[in-house]
Amino acid sequence: MSAAVRVLTLGESMGVIRGDAVGGFERLASASVDTGGAEGNTAVGLARLGVDVTWLGRVGDDALGRRVVGDLRSEAVDVVAVTDAAAPTGLLLKSTPRAGATIVHYYRAGSAGSRLTPGDLDRVDIAAFGILHVTGVTLALSTSARATVLEAVARARTLGLLVSFAVNHRSKLWTAPEARDAYEELLALTDILFASEDEARLVTAAETAVPAEDLAGLLARRGPREVLVTRGSLGCVAAIDGGVRHVAAEPITAVDTVGAGDAFAAGYLAARAWGEPVVERLRVATRCGAYACLHPSDWQGAPRRADLGLAHGDAVAR
């Protein structure tokens, strides 16, 4: 697979209000405005690594919607945004109640992003892409958003695209049984799967004692040819082409881990587009995930290719 591979992703990007200090919003004196959302975060990560990527989504006819579109376009993401005047852009409040901890609250019920419909897919030529990347977040937003993801995947499979699926489970959006049923439906249609260890346990309904490598194997047997199970500071486990590989995490002191999984997925997909072997894909993915943890924004810490030190083996942080 060459660097000319194009990636299509779709979902909700939102406004993000991030507290400027440690503490809850009931006491904070100031906050910063940002944007975020799993698919948009991954799109930025891919674009910074030189991959041609398109993001499709809905935003409200409001300031936050314009901010979402502007932020993505400023990062060289091709944006196909439907402006929905009947609904607001979603919002996320992000606070740090104590050092090392992050709490998020969503205000996205009935948002423009949740009103994606299968008809929105007609705005892009899916046949022009090599990879479709979707996440479980969009599956959870609404019935129409879920139908849009499934229709996108069906079209991608028919056209021969690789389907990449990041579980990105959001417990505040739906119950575990509801989510598991939806994830199972998509797994059989997925080529590349990204899941945290906890998400892998949720999808497989495995006991806590089941090791990560076995979880990866269980997921691989459900359809995906490439399964990547991330384990935070313990690195990741990958089941690819019948083999299992372990990759250590980068030695960092994390500032904020939100968005790390999105950056990890971007790194893996980018390295795959470059034609790198599996070991290098995993190394790039792990490094991208680590970089994302060094910045409080969901996406602003994503590295560019020159930052990765591919020729030098530099550590992300010491």
Image (cartoon, rainbow, N blue to C red):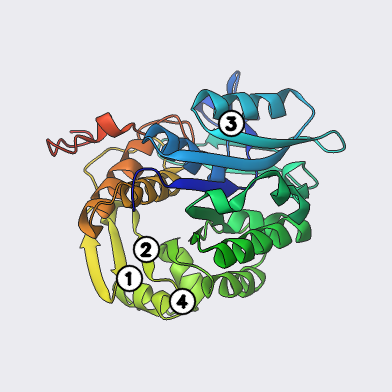
Q: What amino acid is at disc 3?
A: Thr
Task: Say which residue appears at 62% left-offset and 48% top-offset.
Answer: 125
| Location of mark 3 (residue) | 35
Q: Circle 2 sits on which residue?
A: 229
Looking at the rendered image, the disc whose residue lies closer to the viewer, 3 or 1, is 3
Q: Earlier in the sequence, mark 1 or mark 4?
A: 1
Q: CA distance from mark 3 to mark 2?
A: 26 Å
The residues bearing labels 1 and 4 have C-alpha atoms spaced at a distance of 18 Å
Q: CA distance from mark 3 to mark 1?
A: 32 Å
Residue 208 in sight here: no
Asked where in the image residue 17 lies, by quadrant, the reply is top right
Asked whether 283 or 172 is in front, the reply is: 283
Please state which of residues 161 and 117 is positioned toward the viewer in this rendering: 161
Q: Quadrant of residue 45?
A: top left
Q: Disc 1 and disc 2: Cα gap in Å?
A: 7 Å
Residue picked out by circle 4 = 223
Q: Position of residue 272 (x, y in %)?
A: 33, 52
253 vs 44, left or right, is: left
Q: Amino acid at mark 1?
A: Ala
